[in-house]
Amino acid sequence: MMNGLEVEFPNRPNNFSQDEWEARVNLAACYRLVDYYGWSSTVYNHITLRVPNTDTFLINGFGLRYDEICASNLVLIDLDGNKLSDDDLPVNKAGFLIHSAIHQARPKDLHCVMHSHEVNCQTLAASKSEFIPLTQEGCQMYGRVGYHDFNGIVLRNDEQEKIIEALGDKNHTLLMRNHGLLTAGPSAAWAFIRHQHFIRNTEVQLKLMASNAEINIIPEEVLKHTREQFEGGSAQAGAKVRHPEWPAFWRLLDKVDDSWKH
């Protein structure tokens, strides 16, 4: 680690490969950060991360609070829902159906899928309004948000096709009507940071809507330019790593409770 600006993975237990262990640590960080920011729903919702170069992914054991999740107790399953980890933790069916659909449909670019029932996003999802990029960070969502209509708890296989259709081949974010928010990305850092930025923009949007103030719409050419700055990496120019906030999040979690990475 260099001056705390890069992540340093804890020693790997013998029963995990290095790729799986690093995926476990990154995913555990996501769960603990969701708990820290107050976006969790007790034992519900899900975040998944594909183990590199495999058709397997990690998910939370159904029944654990997010502050109880750590790298070693995440559950490993395959794309058919078969458990591969040696534990007695169950897997939430809705979580498997939602996440496995995306892992199968977008295996090249969306390796981490994050779903929450955060209150601001649920509020926007319960309205007929669409997401409006209003903040600098929110610009990265321009043209990258899909909408999925509510059809009850996702427990039927045919719901997967609707999720995939709403996501398309360019979107990385879904506003699930009357349900919640889903973001995805090539890594845990990408998925979490997109989640955080969507929530912040949504909070601004809701406050503006409530105030009846005239909304200052960002011109399309500026939206596209700013989106490219985020996607192309120039927004992080000068940083030692692609997402300099990710090591900062790790340091925050270590101050709160370092059990997350064990």
Image (cartoon, grey):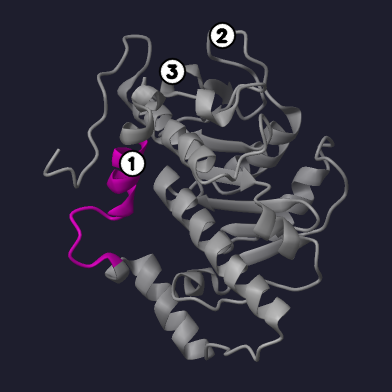
| Identity of the residue furthest to the front in this view | 211
Amino acid type, callout 3:
Ser
Mark seen at residue 72: 3
Secondary element at image label 1: helix
Task: Report the label total.
Answer: 3
Side (left or right) of 137 relative to 132: left
What's under tag 2, amino acid-wise?
A: Asp
Q: Nearer the viewer, residue 258 or 247?
A: 258
Cβ–Cβ under 8 Å for marks 1 and 3: no
Q: Report the residue at 67% width, 21% height from top.
A: 63
Q: Which mark is residue 252?
A: 1
Numbered disc 2: secondary structure: loop
Q: Which mark is residue 87?
A: 2
**Is residue 229 located in the magenta-colored stretch of the structure?**
no
- The correct choice, above or below, for 139 with respect to 261 in the image is below
Q: CA distance from mark 1 to mark 2?
A: 29 Å
Query: Nearer the observer, disc 1 or disc 2?
Result: 1
